[in-house]
Amino acid sequence: MHRTPIYVICSPRPQVGRTLLARLLSEFLLLKNGAVSAFDVNLKEPSLLDYLPKVTETADIDTTFGKMALMDRVIVNDGISKVVDLGFHAFDEFFTMTDEIGFFKEAARRGVTPVILFMADSDRVSLRAHAMLRDQAPRGLLVTVDNEFVLRGEMPEACAGGRTLRIAALPVFLKTYIDRLNFSFTGYLRAEKDSSTELHQWIRDNYFSFRELELSLILQRP
Amino acid sequence: MAKPAVIVVGADKGGVGKTTVSRTLLDYFSANNVPTRAFDTESPRGTLKRFHPDATEIVDMTATADQMKIFDTLNTAAPSVTVIDVRAGLLSPSLAALRDIGFLDAAKSGQITFAVFHILGPSIASLDEIAETAAFMDGAKYFLVKNFINNTSFFEWDQATYNSYFHRIKDATELTIPKLNEMAFEQVEVSSVPFLKFVANKGPNDDAANYSFVLRGYVRHWLANVWSEYDRIKLTEIVGSGKAAARSSGEK
């Protein structure tokens, strides 16, 4: 039986492109599978919800009830991929909880594959968080995201080992264009006839990376 | 046959977690394959019996007939370990009764293993019980159980007060019971199953249950911490059952 992936996109720092990646990945999964469940854990500033309201719901992990509402939903092998956009405020609380409740072991038992997409940055907080995730996440399930717009091509050495996902930097004018609330990546691919545009290629490159990531997860399975 | 062992869990104050600790003990012995019987002194209705109905009998510790039921069967009962959950206010009278029937002398002479888990609450009144109880502890293993269920600090911030209570009794061993998430605790209460069954997602009759994975995780983590305290004091060796076996925390 197929395993259901849960993508947790996270960083202990703001402004690293977390929601952008969550949007891209959610749209890719929606295009490929026809369905996706996204969770926006950014109570102070919901954003994924603003972009993809039809497939996104908010989640609050400040309370035990909120944790149950989120985790008991995502740890289900129902064939629908899950994307969790984990706000930087919730980073410590979330991973303290996953460690305490044995999330990765339970996920393995239930036919669910959690993939941690960590938005790398060069500050000390990010490096410490990355080290903590290396300890907690089973091998291969931690993917370090090299967002060139943030790192400028200088991935910190401490984050460099292991699996990585690269997101190329976009020119600022295109960044502003895709940040509009009514912008859809898949919608752009369908509507734009000229496939040689920079944005067209950027979206296709990212979708291709997601496909590669999915494939590598399938091949990694015992 | 192993020497009989009696573990009394009690406090003179109510609401400090006596039954919770008794439940963790029964789960611990069960996980380590140590046959155990239990007596719940909350007569006529016992909380411990609600969670461990098969192993528990409700008794009235002040009644001679029930005292006979517990202590006259120590050498003949198949489980060599007896856990007694003493209800609030009855710890000192129960220990006095044990002294009067010669039980404490038997423990002193090594015929019986006797351990007392004295559950402490967050008040000075609770700590004052230590001196009172200590008078009966000759020949017993005495454990002062700091139950953090109320997020208390046990006056650790005031070293003089702390020492006056915790360092007064020479041979007492301190045990720490960490705090369990409130919702997880309440869910186990509602389910009326042992902690082990809750972690294993099972109902009272071993039927499949549907408890929250998050709450089960919290209970599993907490129970492992409690058991590591029991391992630290070598509880299975104290009751004469050898070393603690490698065990699962209940989840299959």
Image (tube, rainbow, N blue to C red):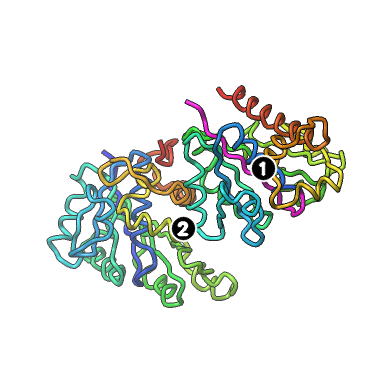
What's the distance in space between the residues labelled 1 and 2, CA to CA? Answer: 25 Å
| Depth order, front residue of A164/A85 | A85
The amino acid beneath tag 1 is Leu
Look at 50% across and 34% down and name the residue there: A79
Rate crowding at label 2 as few (under 14), some (14 to 19) or many (20 or more) other CA atoms within 10 Å. some
Residue B163 coordinates in the image, percent (x, y): 54, 71
The amino acid beneath tag 2 is Leu
Give the residues in magenta: A1-16
Rate crowding at label 1 as few (under 14), some (14 to 19) or many (20 or more) other CA atoms within 10 Å. some
Residue A156 visible? The answer is no
Residue A93 coordinates in the image, percent (x, y): 60, 55
Give the structural element (helix, strand or loop) at label 2: loop
Residue B13 is left or right of residue A34, and the answer is left
Disc number at residue B180?
Answer: 2
Determine whether A162 is above or below B212 in the image. above
Residue sitting at the far bottom: B125
The quadrant in which residue B128 appears is bottom left
Residue sitting at the far left: B65
Disc number at residue A133?
Answer: 1
The quadrant in which residue B246 appears is top left
